[in-house]
Amino acid sequence: MNVSHLLDTLNQAQREAVTAPPGHVLVLAGAGTGKTKVLTHRIAWLLATEQARAHNILAVTFTNKAAREMRTRLETLLNNSSQNLWANTFHSIAHLLLRNIGN
Amino acid sequence: MGKYFSQYCSFVITKHWQLANLPQTFQIIDSDDQLSVLKQVIKSLELDDKVLTPRQAQHFINTRKDHGLRAKDLVAEEGDAWHNRMLHIYTAYEARCQQTGSVDFAELLLRCYELWRDNPSLLAYYQQRFQYILVDEFQDTNPLQYNWLQLLAGQSGQLFVVGDDDQSIYGFRNASAANLANFNQEFPQVQLIRLEQNYRSTGTILEVANTLIARNDQRLGKNLWTQASAGEPIFLYTAYSEMDEARFVAEKVQAYSGQRQEMAILYRTTAQSRLFEEELLQRSIPYRIYGSLRFYERLEIKDMLAYLRLLHHRDDDGAFERIVNTPKRGIGEKTLETLRSIARQQEISLWQAAQHAIETQQLKARASSTLTVFLDLIQQFDEQIKALSLHEKIKHLKTYTGLVAHYQKESKEEAQRRLENLDELINAARQFEQRRSNLPAATTEEANPPIVDILTEFLAHTALEAGEGQGNEWEDCVQLMTLHAAKGLEFEMVFLVGLEENLFPHQNSLDESKLEEERRLCYVGITRARRYLYLCHSETRYRYGNREFGTPSRFIREMPTELIQAVRLSNSIVSPLKSWMALAKGKLHRGERVKHKQFGEGVVLNYEGQGDYARVQIKFASGNKWLMMAYAQLEKLY
């Protein structure tokens, strides 16, 4: 699969983060360095390279606004193949889990 | 898919809410609901909710939950009665919520954490499902969120966390700035990647930010850079007074040719907004306060003004309604309803209705006596403050109304904000008096209307200021906000104001650990700016109604001086002086020499106010003097 569109607009450090090999990653992202871009492109990368399915991904934010922005950006990047993907706040995720929704 | 399917089947019948010991119909309660539950709980325990307030209990409980601690995990502490009662309330609150199936925000996550912790097979299912966990703003995580993520990741999950330890500014919400460093150490083989190329600010702005934040010890460390040019220098304005600071900023805002919404005025405490609001209103510049109300619309300001209004005019029903039971003095809705009905029938004010109801014994004995106490209180205040100046009146009321204690029942941060606003109201009154005392006395030949008393004028002033100004949705407004509210936003031009010791860094945050968070707050402020950054501080400032000398913030000293350009006084355009300038037939600059008929030669130090209120401070041989510009008849010397 062609993934160049996910990487072409990134600088070297961003690309390194987006394509990081399996394991834990800590991205120390200063103000105005494109952190949301890195987060969304990382998800798109995991899906595009078939390392993960949307079902296996959990994206956690602090505010509903940030969650919305992430979902919107993902939809643009992925052409709506992000439907099974959980991108939400800590509270919402805990709520969904307790209600047994999404299984 | 097969292996997931079998796992899936075994859990679809296992109802998570049951495992978590919740009814299927469990309800999420928000912060306000939580408070009212706590209120009932405190009452049912027969504790005094004036001493142990719902707000304090809420803070106590949520903080414990954010650390994953239940009431049973806590122990009573000998000699700490307050702690032990809070613990008691926590226990009863948990029981109450369990009984009613209520789940507060902090509880959601704690429940979920315990559900996983106590059900290993369920946890294993989710660990297998959520192999890839991504977390935004990791520096804002509290200990429970950190543990929740750790539990879910288990041995095989992969965590991809993004954050900036330099922008961790929510310590008061239990966020732990150390979580980023902990993550790096506690999780195996973490790949640390730094994003340092910045796409927002000029090189100069970044260098100033980098230099400042390098002073902090507790950080992983990084250095922002940009391909963009160095851009403009950082401008530093040293104001003579906080009024002068506000005026300087307003002038810059007015002179800016781009969109106003691209400009932000950032301050440390909400109380600081007042002067900027006043200055912007006078110039008819639309503004919006982001994340808060306008000064004169804030609850505590309206409460205090209601006291002044009622004292000034007993028939002010709006004021009466607002404060008759603020702070709580046991005057209930039923009593008020009786008063309203009397007032309607007899076409009199609530105050008169209250007197009438007491005289004619239309109220129950208890209601009558509490109401009498209130009426007497207002009469006493009237006697006590009659001879006081305006700002002393407010000071007196602040001390004796019980409003301070009333607000202190809220969380510490909230209470402090309200008290700072009340102090700012005292400053506002003080400045109002000064301006007024410089007005010329009306001469007999002039057809001036009789000057009304200062309280009437002040109340009118506050009402007018409250009534307009905050821009409409569609209007292009300059943005005012606290530094905390500014996180995540960016602007073409940023004014960082009130950079003085004890204000920023705040006087409550001068110990080492809190100081680092203050410095991060400053760093957040600086990095909001794309092109222009103005730093402002004032040499003097009214605090608690007194003019105090301030020291420039240590944060200014910690920035590279070669990148900072002081705004030269002679460059500033002295627009408030227009009327006087016309008389003087020339431009007036600070530092220029003038001559006064009586006082002789002097140097212009400062000016404030506009139009008829405009006045100028001059250093004469005999000392510094404030003079009304319209009447001073100064002669300019070259």
Image (cartoon, coloured by chain):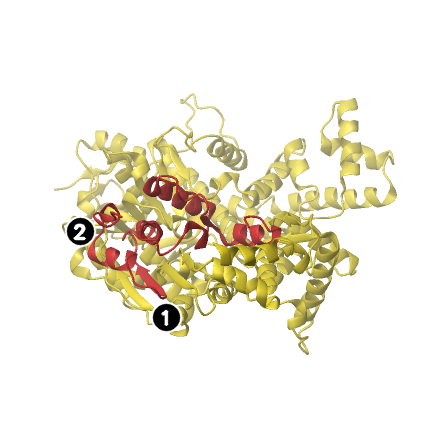
Chain colours: A red, B yellow
Classify the position of the C terminus of chain B by image quarter.
Answer: top left
Quadrant position of residue B556: bottom left
Residue pushed farthest front?
A: B2
Res. B633 in view: no
Give whichever of B524, B583 is nearer the camera. Answer: B524
Judging by the rendered image, the residue that carries numbered circle 1 is: B184
What is the chain letter for disc 2?
Answer: B
Q: Residue at x 41, y 37 (%)?
A: B288
In the picture, measured across the screen, residue A52 lies left or right of residue B604, that is right
Give whichever of B280, A50 is nearer the camera. Answer: A50
* Residue B148: % across, % down: 51, 63
Q: Residue at x 35, y 39 (%)?
A: A79
Q: Secondary structure at mark 2?
A: loop
Q: Residues within 10 Å of mark 2 (few under 14, many from 20)?
A: many
In the picture, measured across the screen, residue B201 lies left or right of residue A71, that is left
Residue pushed farthest left?
A: B638
Q: How many marks?
A: 2
Judging by the rendered image, the residue that carries numbered circle 2 is: B233
Res. B71 in view: yes
Number of the front mark, 1 or 2: 1
What is the chain letter for disc 1?
Answer: B
Q: Residues within 10 Å of mark 1 (few under 14, many from 20)?
A: some
Verify CB contact (< 8 Å) between mark 1 and mark 2: no
Amino acid at pointer 2: Pro
Residue pushed farthest bottom?
A: B78
* Residue B231: % across, % down: 15, 48
* Residue B190: % across, % down: 34, 69
Distance from disc 1 to disc 2, alpha carbons, whole Å, reads 37 Å
Q: Secondary structure at mark 1?
A: helix
- Mark 1 or mark 2: which comes first in sequence? 1
